[in-house]
Every structure is written in structure tokens, then in C-alpha cells.
Image (cartoon, helix red, strand yellow):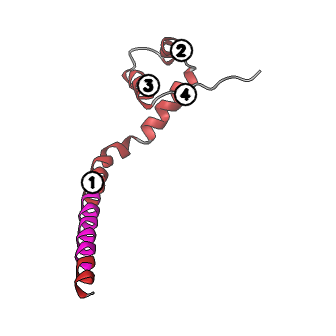
């Protein structure tokens, strides 16, 4: 018999992991509440803690990407303007 795999959103996983980190309830209690296997919660928690340091670096990466996008847009704008000027000069010469 083939079982369907359930897909969980990142926000759901985060919610479950944060509840697990609060330690107000046991992993088994959370597993019953969220209707998932306790091992799944443990795996998500382990993954979250292993990647927690990347969260604080993401903001600077995002700013750098935003700046790169602005520079790229400005360069495309300049290319477009130069193409228009080049085409205009070509027409004037002929």
C-alpha cells in the first residue's frame, strides 16, 4: 500500500519548532497536538538549530542583493538610452 507524503509549510515547521524550544510541552505532546511523528519534530528542531546562525546573516545578504538589483536596473537603463542615441545617430548619418 502506498502512503501519501504530507507536505508541511515552512511557517508550520517554524511554529512547531518554536513550541518545542519553549519546552512547555513534551515532544510527544506536541506530536499529538500537531498530528505528526515525534521524530519529525526532533529532526526539524535539529535542522533549525543547525541553521540558526544563517538567519542573522540573511539581512546583510538581502541588502547586498537589493543593491545589486538597483545597480543592474541602472545599467539596463543606461544601455537602453545609449541604444536609442546610437540608433538616432545612425539615422542622421544616412
Q: Which of 17/88 is in front? A: 88
Query: Does the magenta-highlighted stretch encompass residue 74?
Result: yes
Q: Give me the C-alpha separation between circle 3 and circle 1.
A: 28 Å
Where is residue 6, by image quadrant? Answer: top right
Q: Which of 52/90 is in front? A: 90
Q: Give me the C-alpha separation between circle 3 and circle 2.
A: 12 Å
Crowd band around label 2 with a 10 angstrom C-alpha radius: few (<14), some (14–19), many (20+): few
Q: Which residue is mark 2?
A: 35
Q: Which residues are magenta?
A: 69-86
Mark 2 vs 4, N-terminal side: 4
- Residue 28, percent from left and from top: 52, 15
Identified at 43% across, 25% down, the residue is: 12
Residues at marks 3 and 1 touching, judged by CB atoms closer than 8 Å: no
Identified at 27% across, 54% down, the residue is: 66
Residues at marks 4 and 3 touching, judged by CB atoms closer than 8 Å: no
Magenta stretch mostly in which secondary structure? helix
Q: Nearer the viewer, mark 2 or mark 4?
A: 4
- Residue 52, percent from left and from top: 38, 40
The answer to whether residue 12 is above or below residue 73 is: above
Which mark, by number, is residue 7? 4
Mark 3 vs 1, N-terminal side: 3
Mark 4 vs 3, N-terminal side: 4
Which mark, by number, is residue 66? 1
Where is residue 4, by image quadrant? Answer: top right
Q: Secondary structure at mark 4?
A: loop
Q: Which residue is mark 3?
A: 12
Mark 4 vs 1, N-terminal side: 4
Amino acid at each position: 500500500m502506498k502512503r501519501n507524503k504530507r507536505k508541511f509549510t515552512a511557517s508550520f515547521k517554524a511554529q512547531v519548532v518554536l513550541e518545542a524550544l519553549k519546552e512547555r510541552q513534551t515532544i510527544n505532546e506536541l506530536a499529538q497536538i500537531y498530528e505528526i511523528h515525534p521524530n519529525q519534530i526532533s529532526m526539524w528542531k535539529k535542522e533549525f538549530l543547525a541553521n540558526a546562525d544563517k538567519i542573522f546573516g540573511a539581512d546583510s545578504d538581502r541588502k547586498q542583493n537589493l543593491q545589486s538589483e538597483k545597480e543592474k536596473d541602472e545599467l539596463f537603463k543606461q544601455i537602453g538610452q545609449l541604444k536609442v542615441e546610437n540608433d538616432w545617430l545612425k539615422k542622421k548619418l544616412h
